[in-house]
Image: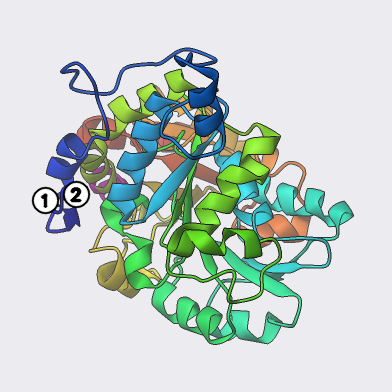
Amino acid sequence: MPVKINSTGGDFMKFNTSLLHSNGSSSKGATITPIYQVSAFAHESAEKLEKVFNNKASGYAYSRIGNPSVDAFEQRMSVLEGGIGAVACASGMAAVTMSLLNILSAGDEIIAGSGLFGGTIDLFRDLEPFGITARYAGTVTAETVEPLINSKTKAVFTELIGNPKLDIVDIKKVAEVCHSHGLPLIIDSTTATPYLIRPFEYGADIVVHSTSKYINGGGNSISGVIIDSGNFNFAKAGYKGFEEYKKFGRSAYLAKLRGSIWRNTGACLSPFNAFMNSVGMETLGLRMERCCYNAQKLAEFFSNDSSIEVNYPGLPDNPYHELVQEQLKGMAGAILTIRTGSKERAFRLINNLKYALIATNIGDVRTLVIHPDSTIYTHGSKEARINAGVYEDTIRISVGIEDIEDLIADFGQAAERSK
């Protein structure tokens, strides 16, 4: 992997080296920060605890507010994305929610792609009673976003690689439009990961991840994270509530997040899950390399089956193929979708698989399959499903690290038996 990452010590390291050697704080010679599985931290005096509570001294008071295991994971994510800091959350959905509520209030609007993950669309619907409205572009491009911007718009939010639509955002062009109107661009980079792209280098302002997915890699912990580039001046742009945080300079967004909505809603990450993420992320580069390779080969296999329609941005005839080469270093991620012609055949194909697990997650080391129409999009309208690339005959495949020969043989026999 040619990408070099500036570590906390100022040295430039390639991706996999950085994963292992920019590993946050540790103690007593531990190679990774251990699990500080405690609720509270004792101090030698009331005066010291007062200073810690009021951010006048370093230290920890209560794990909802700060914890060494969580702090180490946040540092590592910030280094990987090239940000100035990060805040870890209890889930990916918590990260999406906190990233937006930190800057929004009643009467505000956000612009988003209509092909977002179903849970995110459900969240936007839940925000409507609080006076926050989402306006949807079919696909997020500079041309579709600009006409939707008005005086109420406060952010543009989009997934970098849509799940499961697999549309890819040209970050640089969309960021230019956002910034010309004084708006931040918030990118959900869960399906891309820092291995394929670091969105800040293309103009994004805030990045969020559901770290339950590829960052963790083992499917063993629910978690999320918000990383700030430090490049968008929210106070100068007139965002409410930022006046008292101007003193933090480029860290104003993170300071407000930690000091208010994230802290007060209790959306913190548990120390145990932070530790599991820190362990899992050390193999992120190796896993993504294998998963992307397998996804490409599996997509090529399906492209030779006239009874199946495959969607994968790495295929030459895909409309996002060129953007994959320019922006994602030629790797299109580890998710592909297929259409089988009917819901019945989709179910038969899924049920005949031997190795792929029928599960709702993505980013596991194991290959996972799901029928989105009857599960993660079951509450969405027909229009919302179509906008997300979800049809009755759609199967989403999150490709794992198995031997590709076994995956191709398995999907081949399942496709044949499903006819």
| Picture coordinates of residue 390, whole percent (x, y) | 62, 53
Whether tag 1 and tag 2 are in contact, CB under 8 A, the answer is yes
- In the foreground, 296 or 379: 379
Residue 158 location in percent, x, y?
55, 62
Q: Amino acid at mark 1?
A: Met
Q: Residue at x 48, y 43 (%)?
A: 87
Residue 202 located left or right of residue 286: right
* Magenta stretch encompasses residue 297: yes
In the rendered image, residue 31, in percent from the top left (x then y), is placed at 18, 22
What residue is rendered at 53% in x and 51% in y?
255
User: Most extreme residue toward the right, as rendered?
Assistant: 129
Asked if residue 155 is among those painted magenta in the image, a careful observer would answer no
Q: Which residues are magenta?
A: 293-298
Of residue 313 and residue 156, the one placed in the foreground of this image is: 156
- Would residue 16 appear left or right of 297 to someone viewing this image? left
Residue annotated with mark 2:
7
Q: Within 10 Å of the Cα at label 2, are there few (<14), some (14-19), or many (20+) other Cα atoms?
A: many
Mark 2 is on which residue type?
Ser
Above or below, 356 relative to 377: above
Please say if 135 is above or below 216: below
Q: In the picture provided, is 106 more to the left or to the right than 196?
A: right
Label located before the other in sequence (1 or 2): 2
User: Can the viewer see residue 160 in this picture?
Assistant: no
Secondary structure of the residue carrying numbered label 1:
strand
Residue lying at 39% horizontally and 70% vertically, measured from the top left: 320
Within 10 Å of disc 1 (Cα), the crowding (few <14, some 14-19, many 20+) is: some
Q: Quadrant of residue 16?
A: top left
- Which residue was labeled with disc 1? 13
Can you say whether 32 is above or below 248 in the image? above
Is residue 405 at least partly visible in the picture? yes
Q: CA distance from mark 1 to mark 2?
A: 7 Å
